Image: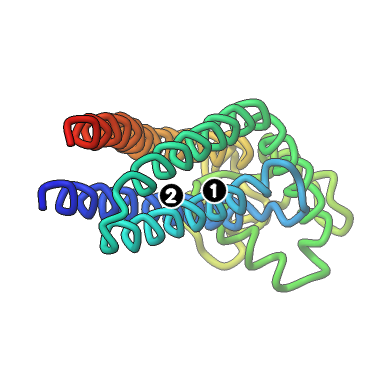
Amino acid sequence: HPPFSLSLCLCFSVSACAVGLIAIGVAVQVVLNQTITHETTPGSLLPVVIIAVGAFLFLVAFVGCCGACKENYWHFCGEFAVFLSLIMLVEVAVAIAGYVFRDKVESEFNKNFRQQMQNYLKDNNTALVLDGLQKEFGCCGANNYTDWENISGMAKDRVPDSCCVNITVGCGNDFKKSAIHTQGCVESIGVWLRKKILLVAAAALGIAFVEVLGIIFSCCLVKSIRSGYEVM
């Protein structure tokens, strides 16, 4: 049965898109966790919405496969096209929200990073997180290395050892400017985030393209089945 084969092919394609969306949502969540943005904000809720949309899309694909197996092509194609269209609208809304709140996420990270800096000498876990970020991204402080001067208990001529270009024990004491990273972490991590967002956007566009093909294909299949009924 050609309709059966085509319907199953469409189901599996949409299932792959659903898995892709869930993977994108998880990836975005991991990225946000790496930038120590812990507060519940519009920006931090985006990955949750993406994962939910992916899960719903997978459910639609599963139900569609069941309909195809029962050879209920008319309902399968019609409902499939409607659900895919609704999901596309939700994805467009999520994309717009992501674009609108992109600066909000960066400002939240800036605020959160500065708060963590205040706890650097008080909390070993916080120190480990900040040291890890400064080492990984080759940065120092929020805006620049001078931010550490404003931290209570931190001497004016001292920065964490993780700011040093070549890290050794005590290298942050009486440092020379040429021996440390002077750029702030907010800017360095912001550049890294923008690159990651471009990759996520490219993957999302690919998924959207497959979904559009799915909608067109479903509509064409409905028209074909309807024509078959009319001939009969």
Disc 1: which residue: 50
Q: Position of residue 128 (x, y in %)?
A: 63, 68
Work out whether 61 lies above or below 230. below
As drawn, which residue projects farthest toward the bottom?
Answer: 124
Amino acid type, label 2? Leu
Crowd tier of the residue under label 1, counting other residues whose Cα lies within 10 Å: few below 14, some 14–19, many 20 or above = many
Q: Are marks 2 and 1 in contact (CB under 8 Å)?
A: yes
Q: Position of residue 126 (x, y in %)?
A: 72, 65
Task: Please report the residue visible at 63 percent of the width from the left and 38 percent of the height from the top.
Answer: 186
- Could you tell whether 155 is left or right of 159 in the image? right
Q: Quadrant of residue 204?
A: top left
Q: Nearer the viewer, residue 183 or 101?
A: 101
Work out whether 132 lies above or below 175. below
- Could you tell whether 124 is left or right of 180 in the image? right
Amino acid type, label 1? Ile
Q: CA distance from mark 2 to mark 1?
A: 6 Å
